[in-house]
Amino acid sequence: MRTRVWFFGIGAAGLLVAIAFAASHGPVWASEDKPADYQTWGEDHVGQELPEYTTGTECLFCHRDYVAPRWKSNPHNRTMRFPEPDDPALKALADSTDGKAIVGEVQILLGSKDHVRYLKRLEAYGEAAMSGQLWNGTEKQIRHAQPPGWHQDTFGPQCAGCHATAIDTETISFGSPSLDCYVCHGILELEHANDNTQTLFSPEHADDPRVVISVCGQCHLRGGKSRATGRPYPTLFVPGDNLFRDFDVDWSDDTIARMDMIDKHIFENARAVMVAGSKTTCTSCHSVHGESTKKHQELEQDQSCETCHRPGKEMTDVDLPKNRSSRTCEYP
Ligand code: HEC
Ligand code: HEC
Ligand code: HEC
Ligand code: HEC
Ligand code: HEC
Ligand code: HEC
C-alpha cells in the first residue's frame, strides 16, 4: 500500500469523526441550519460499507440488443477511456513544450467533447495521477488547469466521484474506472429479469421524481459539497437514496443567475422537483441510452422552457453555449 501522508496527516481525523457521526445520527447538519423537507426524506448510505454491485459486463451479457451497441459510444461510458493513438488531445500534448516529457506515460483520457485531461494509473488499484495540462477541443490548444506534470492527490478527492464508479470513502479509490451501469441503476437483483415493477428506469415502474433528480444530480449538480467529507461529490450515494441528505447544493437565484444555459436548466429543474414538487425531471426530456432530447419537444410549454427558448423567438432558434466552463471540473 502506498503511504498517504497527506490523507492521514490532514483529513483523516475529521473525516472519521464526520463518518462516525453521520452513521449514528443521520446526515451532518451545521447547528444553525434547520434542514428543509427535501433534505430529510428517504435514506443515505454515508458511513456504511460499499455495496456489492453487478458490473456492466454482466448486465450487457443479457442486454445485448438495445443497450450494448449504444453503450460503446455513450459519453458516460467514455468519460475515462484508453486513448486511440491518433487522438487529437494526445497529439497536441506530444507537440507541446511541457507535454513531450509525459505523453508516453499517459494511459487514460478524461472528458470528451470539449475538454480532456491526462491520467496515468498508480500502483494501488483504483487510483490515478492526473497531469496539469488540459486540452481545449474548441480552441484546439493545450492549456493548464494545474502546473504541468503529474499530480497524485487531485483525481481521487476532487474528481473520481463523478467520473469513476463506487468510490471507497476512506482510501478514495474507485471500484471501476469511468461510469458503470451501477451509478444510475444501482443494485439490481437478478429477479428483475422477471418483474420490473420495482426496477428504476424501467417503463414498467413509476420512478419517484425525487429519486431521478438524486441519481442524475449526484454528478450534474456541479458545485455541491458532501457534508460527510467536504468533497465536491456525494459520499457513498446509491441510486434510490435521497442525494440531499449528504450533498449540499446551492440553487439560490443569485447562484443560478451566474450559470450558463445548460447548468441553469439542470439546477432549475432539480429545484423545481425538490422544492416545488414538479413532476418533470431529467428523464422527461433526456433519453440516456438513446442520447436524445427529442421527447422534450412533446412537453407542454411552461416557464421552464424559457431558460433556452426566448419568448418571441422561433422554437428552433436556440443558442446553446459553445465554450463552457466549470470550476469543479477545472476548465476555465
Ligand atoms: C440474466 C440476464 C440479465 C442480467 C445479468 C441483467 N438483466 Fe436486466 N433484464 C433482463 C430481462 C430478461 C429483463 C426484462 C425486460 C427485457 O427483456 O429487456 C430485464 C430488464 C431490465 C430493465 C428494465 C427494462 C424494461 O424494459 O422494463 C433494466 C433497466 C435492466 N434490466 C437493467 C439491468 C442492469 C443495469 C443490469 C446489470 C446490473 C442488468 N439489467 C442485468 C435480463 C438481465
Ligand atoms: C456518476 C456521474 C453521473 C451520473 C449519475 C449521471 N451523469 Fe450524465 N454525465 C456525467 C459525465 C461525467 C458526463 C460527461 C462525460 C464526458 O464528456 O466526459 C455526462 C454527460 C451527460 C450528458 C451529455 C451527453 C452527451 O450526449 O453529450 C447528458 C445529457 C447527461 N449526462 C444526462 C444525464 C442524466 C439524464 C442522468 C440521470 C439519469 C445522468 N446524466 C447521470 C456524469 C453523470
Ligand atoms: C424540459 C426538458 C429538459 C429537462 C427537464 C432537462 N433537460 Fe437537459 N437538456 C434539454 C435539452 C433540450 C438540451 C439541449 C440538447 C442539445 O440539443 O444539445 C439539454 C442539455 C443538457 C445537457 C448538455 C448536453 C450536451 O450535449 O452537452 C446536460 C448535461 C443535461 N441537459 C442534463 C440534464 C439533467 C441532469 C437534467 C435533470 C436535472 C436535465 N438535463 C433536465 C432538456 C431538458
Ligand atoms: C447515466 C445513467 C445511466 C447509466 C450509466 C446506465 N443507464 Fe440504463 N437507463 C438509464 C435511464 C435514464 C433509462 C431510461 C431510458 C433512457 O433514458 O434511455 C435507462 C434504461 C435502461 C434499460 C431499459 C431500456 C429500455 O428498453 O427502455 C436497460 C436495459 C438499461 N438501462 C441497462 C443499462 C446497462 C446494462 C447499463 C450499463 C452498461 C446502463 N443501463 C447504464 C440511465 C443509465
Ligand atoms: C436546455 C435547453 C432547452 C430547454 C430547457 C428546452 N428546450 Fe426545447 N429545444 C432546445 C434545443 C437546443 C432545440 C433544438 C432541437 C433539439 O436539439 O431538440 C429545441 C427544440 C424544441 C422544439 C422543436 C422546434 C422545432 O420546430 O424543431 C420544441 C417544440 C421545443 N424545443 C419545446 C420545448 C418545451 C415545450 C420546453 C419546456 C417544457 C423546452 N423546449 C425546453 C433546448 C431546450
Ligand atoms: C460533482 C460531479 C463532478 C466532479 C466532482 C467533477 N466532475 Fe467533471 N464533469 C461532471 C459532469 C456532470 C460533466 C458533464 C458536464 C456537462 O456536459 O454538462 C463533467 C465533464 C467533465 C469534462 C469534460 C468536459 C467537456 O466539455 O468535454 C472534464 C474534462 C472534466 N469533467 C474534468 C473533471 C476534473 C479534472 C475534475 C476534478 C478536478 C472533475 N471533472 C470533477 C461532473 C463532475
Image (tube, rainbow, N blue to C red):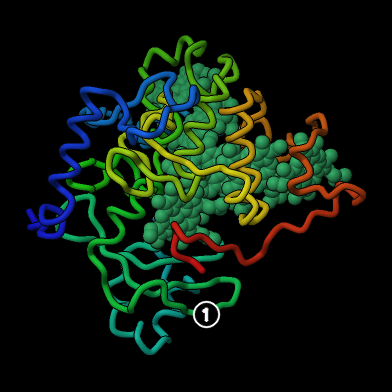
Q: Give how far across and how far down residue 5 sits, in percent.
A: 10, 59
Secondary structure beneath label 1 = strand
Q: Give how far across and how far down residue 315 sits, in percent.
A: 86, 47
Residue at screen point 36% across, 29% down: 238
In the image, the residue with mark 1 has its CB under 8 Å from the nearest atom of ligand 6: no
Q: Is residue 33 above or below residue 162?
A: above
Q: Is residue 9 above or below residue 241?
A: below
Task: Determine if residue 188 is in view.
Answer: yes
Q: In which quarter of the image is residue 24?
A: top left
Q: In this view, does 331 lie to the left or right of 11?
A: right
Residue farthest toward the bottom in the current orientation of the protein: 97
Q: In this view, does 117 lie to the left or right of 122?
A: right
Q: Is residue 193 above or below residue 106?
A: above
Q: Is residue 94 left or right of residue 201?
A: left
Q: Give how far across and how far down residue 222 sits, in percent.
A: 48, 49
Give whichever of 276, 313 is nearer the camera.
Answer: 276
Give whichever of 114, 267 is nearer the camera.
Answer: 267
Q: Residues within 10 Å of mark 1 (few under 14, many from 20)?
A: some
Task: Determine if residue 65 is in view.
Answer: no
- The three-letter amino acid code for the residue at tag 1 is Gln
Residue at screen point 27% across, 43% down: 229
Q: In which quarter of the image is residue 91?
A: bottom left
* Residue identified by numbered label 1: 141
Give whichever of 181, 34 is nearer the camera.
Answer: 34
Residue at screen point 59% across, 34% down: 271
Q: Give how far across and how far down residue 42 sits, in percent.
A: 41, 19
Residue at screen point 42% across, 86% down: 95
Q: How many labels does the image show?
A: 1
Q: In which quarter of the image is residue 176?
A: top left
